[in-house]
């Protein structure tokens, strides 16, 4: 049985809050990093189909692999945009090397 509000209790569904007026110009955030997507080490490992230890090895040994962002002690994340830039550079990299070496 559903209890209905009595006359002395206000109906919570009929209560409304004042609606703020929308401004005509869209407010841009002052920080572009706050709109970024952060990935965990497991997310990065899944993206490249490797183990988490491989991701950490890349951070240590591969100088062009994106460095993680330390948010708090024990919380390390990668910016998705950094990984996408890295992937694009990797795709363009072999073609640029061939051109410099005189191939293709």
Image: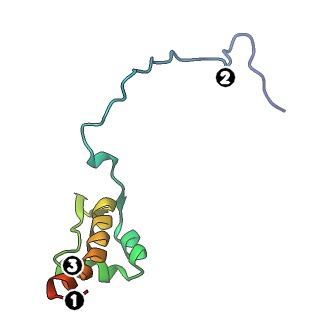
Q: Which residue is drawn at 28% across and 76% down?
A: 90
Measured along the vertical axis of the image, is residue 47 above or below residue 16? below
Q: Nearer the N terminus, badge 2 or badge 1? A: 2
Q: What is the spatial separation of the Cα atoms under label 2 and label 1, in whole angstroms? A: 71 Å
Q: Residue at x 78, y 22 (%)?
A: 4
Q: Do the residues labelled 2 and 1 touch (CB within 8 Å)?
A: no
Camera sees residue 72: no
Q: Nearer the N terminus, badge 3 or badge 1? A: 3
In this rendering, the label closer to the viewer, 2 or 3: 3
Please, what secondary structure does the residue beneath circle 3 have? helix
Residue for badge 2:
13
Measured along the vertical axis of the image, is residue 47 above or below residue 28? below
Q: Residue at x 31, y 83 (%)?
A: 54
Residue for badge 1:
103
Q: Are marks 3 and 1 in contact (CB under 8 Å)?
A: no
Q: Nearer the N terminus, badge 2 or badge 3? A: 2
Measured along the vertical axis of the image, is residue 43 above or below residue 73? below
Q: What is the spatial separation of the Cα atoms under label 3 and label 1, in whole angstroms? A: 10 Å
Q: Where is residue 19 in the image (x, y as percent from the top left)?
A: 50, 18
Location of the N terminus by quadrant is top right
Q: Where is residue 34 in the image (x, y as percent from the top left)?
A: 30, 46
Residue for badge 3:
96
Camera sees residue 43: yes
In this rendering, the label closer to the viewer, 3 or 1: 1
């Amino acid at each position: 049985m559903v209890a209905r509000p009595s006359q002395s209790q206000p109906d919570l569904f009929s209560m409304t809050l004042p609606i703020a007026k929308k401004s005509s110009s869209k407010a841009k955030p002052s920080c572009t990093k706050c709109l970024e997507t952060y990935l965990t080490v497991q997310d990065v490992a899944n993206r490249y189909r490797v183990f988490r230890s491989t991701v950490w090895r890349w951070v240590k040994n591969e100088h062009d692999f994106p460095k993680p962002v330390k948010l708090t002690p024990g919380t390390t994340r990668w910016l998705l945009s950094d990984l996408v830039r890295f992937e694009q550079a990797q795709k363009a990299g072999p073609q640029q090397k061939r051109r410099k070496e005189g191939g293709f």
